[in-house]
Image: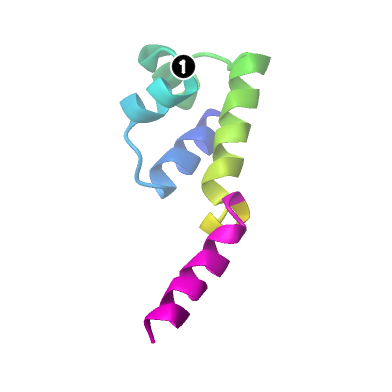
Amino acid sequence: MGKQIRKLRTDKGLPLRKVAALLDIDQSILSKTERGERKASKDQIKKIRDYDELLNKTENDINPGLNLRKRTRLYKKS
């Protein structure tokens, strides 16, 4: 599990301290979890999965009307 967590974080180029802060997990606990020295709690696993799911969404998934507004602005400028 720890290797998967580290891969998710490093694939996105995110520093450990930033992810730990965003997930409200102590940095040392997250580090130990990534190294396999500590098991993640169910709550921590849920936070990590939710965060990964959010990172994998596109801007359009998060705000579906955004592309329409961008296209409308571009159209009006023409």
**Image quadrant where one finds the C terminus:** bottom left
Q: In this view, does 39 lie above or below 69?
A: above
Q: In this view, does 51 lie to the left or right of 29?
A: right
Q: Is residue 22 above or below residue 8?
A: above
Which residue appears at 32% of the width and 25% of the height? Answer: 17
The residue under label 1 is 24
Q: Where is residue 72 in the image (x, y as percent from the top left)?
A: 50, 73
Q: Categorize mark 1 by other alpha carbons within 10 Å: few (<14), some (14-19), many (20+).
A: few
The three-letter amino acid code for the residue at tag 1 is Asp
Q: Where is residue 47 in the image (x, y as percent from the top left)?
A: 59, 25
What's the colour scheme?
rainbow
Q: Where is residue 75 in the image (x, y as percent from the top left)?
A: 46, 81
Q: How many marks?
A: 1
Residue closer to the observer: 40 or 26: 26
Which residue appears at 58% of the width and 49% of the height? Answer: 62
- The residue tagged with tag 1: helix, strand or loop? loop
Residue closer to the observer: 39 or 16: 16
Q: In which quarter of the image is residue 46?
A: top right
Q: In this view, does 24 lie to the left or right of 17?
A: right
Does the magenta stretch mainly form a helix, a strand or a loop?
Answer: helix
Can residue 28 be found in the magenta stretch? no
Q: Quadrant of residue 16?
A: top left
Q: Where is residue 48 in the image (x, y as percent from the top left)?
A: 56, 29
Which residue appears at 39% of the width and 21% of the height? Answer: 21
Can residue 66 be found in the magenta stretch? yes
Residue closer to the observer: 58 or 72: 72
**Image quadrant where one finds the N terminus:** top right
Q: In which quarter of the image is residue 61?
A: bottom right
Q: Give the range drawn in magenta.
A: 62-78
Q: In this view, does 23 lie above or below 9?
A: above
Residue closer to the observer: 32 or 65: 65
